Amino acid sequence: MAFLDLPFMFKAFRFNNRLVVGDGRRRKKKKPSWLTPVSHGYYTVDRSSYTDHSSNDDSVFVQREQQNEELEVWLFGVSNSETGKEMVKYMQNHLFNKLPNELGIMRKCKETIRRAYAEEERTGGSAASVAVVNGEKLAMASIGGHRVVVCRDGEAYQIRDKNRRSLIKHWPQLMFPVCNQGEREDESDPRNSEIVVVTEKINLDTEFIIIGSYGIWEVMKNQEAINLIRHIEDPKEAAKCLAKEALNRISKSSISCVVIRFD
């Protein structure tokens, strides 16, 4: 019997050897960020020439920081080119300055976005942004007519104030309303000054995210936008398709969007 137990004892020893550090403490093996790649594409309609040049109405920003082998942070956003300048500058200066470890980065993302958007609300601007950590966690915010929509298993999910949950599909994570200055029946109204910050885990159902200006949502619903580009694997082509469709539908506002895919 003792001989028959030896293989089992050997396997158990090898298993424990992977989990225990020299001082006896158990070690959690982190998942390298490159195992969850993030791809993106953006498109801005220039109404003066209908080409890919930047519009005077919107500003698209994308920034990536690799802190170490275990921490990667992406920042995406679309905002008014004039009123959104200070908001973007604040996030870029504070979010990537002295990044904490993975345990504290989401707290910093939420706080940085909240403070930046408080300034945006004061200037009466419109913006939407997304921070992605290690391709596994999201911090999202929007104000005015700009909007963040997440495609999860083919369904559209839009961030809202917690008081409006009955109007939308339920978010599994907590929602953090920062400022609410009254509710309007038209939730896409660019004059709406409500700021909402949401955190969400990226799971197997999370396919992609659309960050769009008011010109997108003025002429199409969330699910329409999802259905339009879901089959397009290249996020650059998806963003272009979405923007061109808004233009074809005679959108009268600025048209800019970012599509973020999780492969």
Image (spheres, rainbow, N blue to C red):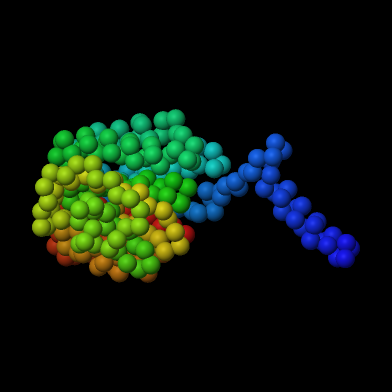
Report the number of discs.
0
Choose between 65 and 31: the one closer to the eye. 31
Q: Quadrant of residue 193?
A: top left
Q: Position of residue 148 (x, y in %)?
A: 28, 53
Q: Residue at x 45, y 34 (%)?
A: 99
Residue 1 seen in the figure: yes
Instruction: Give the residue drawn at x 46%, y 51%.
Output: 135
Which residue is drawn at the image coordinates 24% and 62% (left, top)?
168
Q: Could you tell whether 22 is left or right of 29 in the image?
A: right
Q: What percent of the width, then of the height, locates residue 170? A: 29, 61
**Camera-side residue: 122 or 23?**
23
Of the 4 image quadrants, the one containing the N terminus is: bottom right
Left or right position of 33 against 146: right
**Residue drawn at (83%, 62%) of the image:** 5
Q: Is residue 239 left or right of residue 71?
A: left
Can residue 49 be seen in this snapshot? no
Vertical order, 173 against 64 (above or below): below
Question: In the rendering, at what x and y percent does residue 150 appear?
Answer: 33, 58
127 over 262 or under it: above or below: above
- 234 or 125: nearer the viewer: 125
Position of residue 225 relative to residue 67, above or below, is below
Rendering coords of residue 134 (x, y %): 47, 47
Residue placed farthest to the front in the image? 1
